[in-house]
Amino acid sequence: MKNAVGRELPEQIGNYTVKPFAGTGKAQKVLPPVVSKRQPRLGPEDGKKLCESLQEAIRKTGLKDGMTISFHHSFREGDMIIGQVLTAIRALGIKGLRFAPSAVVNIKNPSIVDFVKDGTIDRIEASGIRGELGDAVIDGLMEQPVILRPHGARPRAIETGELQIDVAFIGASASDEYGNCTGQIGPNACGSLGYSFVDAANAAQVVIVTDNLVEYPCCPTSISQQYVDYVVVIDQIGDPAKIGAGAARMTKNPRDLMIASRAADAIAASRLFKDGFSFQTGAGAISIACTNYLAERMEERGIKASFALGGMTANIIEMFKKGLVRVLECSQSFDAVAARAIAEYPNILEIDNSVYSNPYTRGSMLDKLNFGVLGALEVDTDFNLNILTGMSGEMMGGLGGGPDVADGADISIVTIPVIRGRTPSIVPKVFTCCTPGDSVAMVVTEAGIALNPKHKYYDMLKEDLEAAGLKLVTIQYLCDLALSYTGIPKPIETTDKVVAVVEYRDGTVIDVIRQIKR
Amino acid sequence: MRLTKAGIAGTMESSDVMVTVRPAEEAGIRIAIESKVEAQYGDEMRQTVLDVMNDFGIEAAEVELRDRGALDCVIRARTQTAVCRALGTGFDWKGEDR
């Protein structure tokens, strides 16, 4: 069967029943009551939650073969918890677990691949996989397909019961012995624990893992003791120098700077750019540069924003300090500066990932967002975005909040070079469709800006951008230009085996990723 | 034209290619490619190298491309330069004046 973006999907993949994506705005409006594994239950009889070791905590949770475990990815590439917890689980001989972190970062030594190969993990659900695990999955490592969900879809999947968590392991840079904990303070501060709120509230058991036990009560507290079963102190939970690795850098690439500047110009040209506007820019190289250019445009015009949303970076904190933004709503902190800022300023807030991005609430903050700046690996002539797979079909990225921001923001702006090396970025058809083109307002490149004629604000944007003298081109022009430089690539050959399912915000399937033929 | 020594051109920078040409005993152009986009563009890369060798009239060579995502024009230019260096001659620009 084909879904609304023309992707050929099987009806059933192993145990997974495919609900095809029906189009933006076609989602089921109301879902059944929330499903939770959280039990009304007394605390430990002796009042002791503190465990001597990870193994002791795992034994006490009663973790068994086939259960589901979760983690957050707020330590990003610096995470040292996932490896230690999985090693302890393996030592206890527990097998066949469903591994459901908010995203899989590229952790090494040990690699997640080792735990799949030895049978500790047999299913993975996350927002993205890359690195060694991504390569292994695309080559058919797993029996069951990996389920990939954007950030807004994970809390929905947990609350609908599609993803029920037995034990949530939550890394915290400070915790007291009763489980009040946070990521905002301590030597290994990671900032917002936004991804873990839904896990803490709905998992059957919650284990806090920290390397910094503080006096009761921990202040500030992000995750409350009322959800916490056990607390474990280990030597080191993460490497803060690596939390920002691969993300928070200011590019010197003149092409990227040109694209970033042009995206800021497009924002500044819009009539929605006025006092009280809101934005989300993200952590890619072009995004960070775009944030800086946006700050310049705001200062030039004397315009202040009401809020910035999502993953925070040092340069957005800088804008806040200059009084350019009134409130920062942080679902994630991308670097050490952003991580510590939450505890320092009352208007820099840690928010639940669900209030950030989950469409199935009484309102997520994305609904109030004016401008969202996005990155992508590929854009096609229908404006569909691929943010997962690279030139040879390899896993390159994560869905993150990309599909959520595109859908939620009034104006979603994709910043992307026309080519990367010999790889065209603007193509006739994306290899993996992650974000439907209908939700993308414009694509900004070094060769011009392409507005999406199907977007709800097309007429307004055309008028505003033309009035500002910005260079408008068609997406077909950009695609032709890209292919004129690179030549037409041979298509990637795949087998029929589905290795990953790409879900949209509403839990329908927007695409699948098939095993690459070698 | 016969190669008597090796010639190298290019760098390992992103979007470039390092091309090495070496003399070969047996007739024919043998091409080794190391590239992340070989599956997509390997045939075009080989054809470009063969075209350059044909232009110089070279019938026996071993050519190695260590590609970092170079466009076709870059592969052509680096291959031409590597051959010129191996032959110890300059490039005949007259051919470009068409």
Image (spheres, coloured by chain):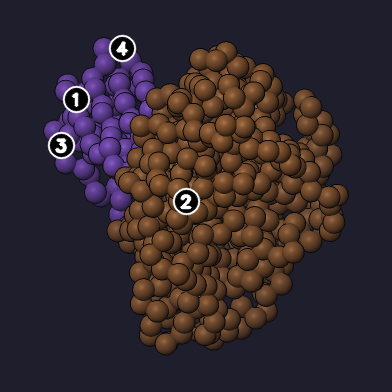
Marks 4/1: CA distance? 16 Å
Chain B display color: purple
Is residue A74 rendered to the left or right of residue A68? left
Q: Which mark is residue B6?
A: 1
Front residue (pair A363, B54):
A363
Residue depth check, mark 4 versus mark 1: number of the one nearer the observer? 1
Helix, strand or loop status at disc 4: loop
Q: CA distance from mark 1 to mark 3?
A: 13 Å
Q: Which residue is mark 3?
A: B89
On the image, which quarter does residue A58 sit in? Answer: top right
Q: Position of residue A420 (x, y in %)?
A: 43, 49
- Between the C-alphas of marks 2 and 3, the distance is 79 Å
In percent of the image, x 52 and y 42: which residue is there?
A178
Q: Residue at x 64, y 55 (%)?
A: A354
The kind of residue tagged 2 is Pro
Compared with A116, A470 (above or below) is: below
**Relative height, residue B36 to residue A149 (above, below):** above
Q: Nearer the viewer, mark 2 or mark 1?
A: 2
Q: The C terminus of chain B is located in which quarter? A: bottom left
Spatial separation of the CA atoms under disc 4 and disc 3: 23 Å
* Residue type of the residue flagged with mark 4: Glu
Point out the tag, 1 or 3, that comes first from the N-terminus: 1
Q: Does residue A488 appear in this view?
A: no
Chain letter of disc 2 in the image: A
Q: How far across and how far down the image is residue B76, in percent?
A: 34, 40
Residue A307 appears in the picture as rendered: yes
